[in-house]
Image (spheres, rainbow, N blue to C red):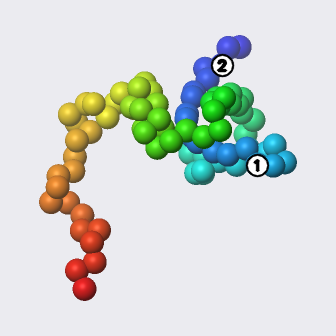
């Protein structure tokens, strides 16, 4: 029986013990076996611009271009600045 695989993308860090530490929780419930593909740069670190550009080109976010996903306006939420 063939199984369909679903992909998600998260960021993380490989620590000194060579263990992968994710920046966020996985959006799936466990326990569950998964397959992991690790992509890394030969450079020491990616800067913020490189991360943003990689995310912008990632097809996983294509749905955000749909007008139906544009549900917030500048009037939503509160200011980040402390007015005190």
Residue count near mark 2 (Cα–Cα under 10 Å), binned few <14, some 14–19, many ≥20? few
Question: How many residues crowd around disc 1 within 10 Å: few (fewer than 14), some, or many (20 or more)?
Answer: few
Query: Which residue is the site of mark 2?
Result: 3
- Left or right of 44? Residue 65 is left
Please tell me which residue lies in front, 57 or 78.
57
Secondary structure state at the residue bearing disc 1: loop
Q: Residues at badges 2 and 1 in contact (C-beta under 8 Å)?
A: no
Residue 2, relative to residue 83: is it above or below? above
The residue under the point 20% across, 60% down is 76
Residue 56 image point, x, y percent: 39, 31
Q: Which residue is mark 1?
A: 15
Q: Is residue 28 visible?
A: no
Q: Residue at x 48, y 38 (%)?
A: 51
At a point 26% along the width and 39% down the height, the residue shown is 69
The answer to which quarter of the image holds residue 27 is: top right
| Labels 2, 1: front one | 1
Q: Please name the residue shown 41% across and 32% down the image.
A: 53
Query: Which sits in the foreground, 56 or 76?
Result: 56
Percent of width and height locating residue 48: 46, 43
Image coordinates for residue 73, horizontal then vertical, percent:
17, 52
Marked residue nearer the N-terminal end (2 or 1): 2
Looking at the image, residue 42 lies above or below residue 12: above
Q: Secondary structure at mark 2?
A: loop
Q: Could you tell me if residue 6 is visible in this image? A: yes
Quadrant for the N terminus in the image:
top right
Residue 58 vs 13, above or below: the answer is above
Compared to residue 10, the image places residue 63 above or below, namely above
* In this rendering, position of residue 54 left or right of residue 75: right
């Amino acid at each position: 029986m063939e199984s369909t695989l679903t992909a998600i993308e998260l960021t993380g860090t490989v620590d000194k013990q060579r263990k992968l530490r994710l920046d966020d929780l996985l959006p799936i419930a466990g326990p569950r076996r998964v397959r992991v593909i690790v992509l890394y740069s030969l450079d020491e670190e990616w800067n913020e611009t490189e991360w943003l550009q990689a995310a912008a080109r990632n097809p996983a976010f294509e749905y955000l271009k749909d007008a139906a996903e544009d549900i917030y306006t500048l009037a939503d939420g509160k200011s980040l600045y402390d007015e005190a």
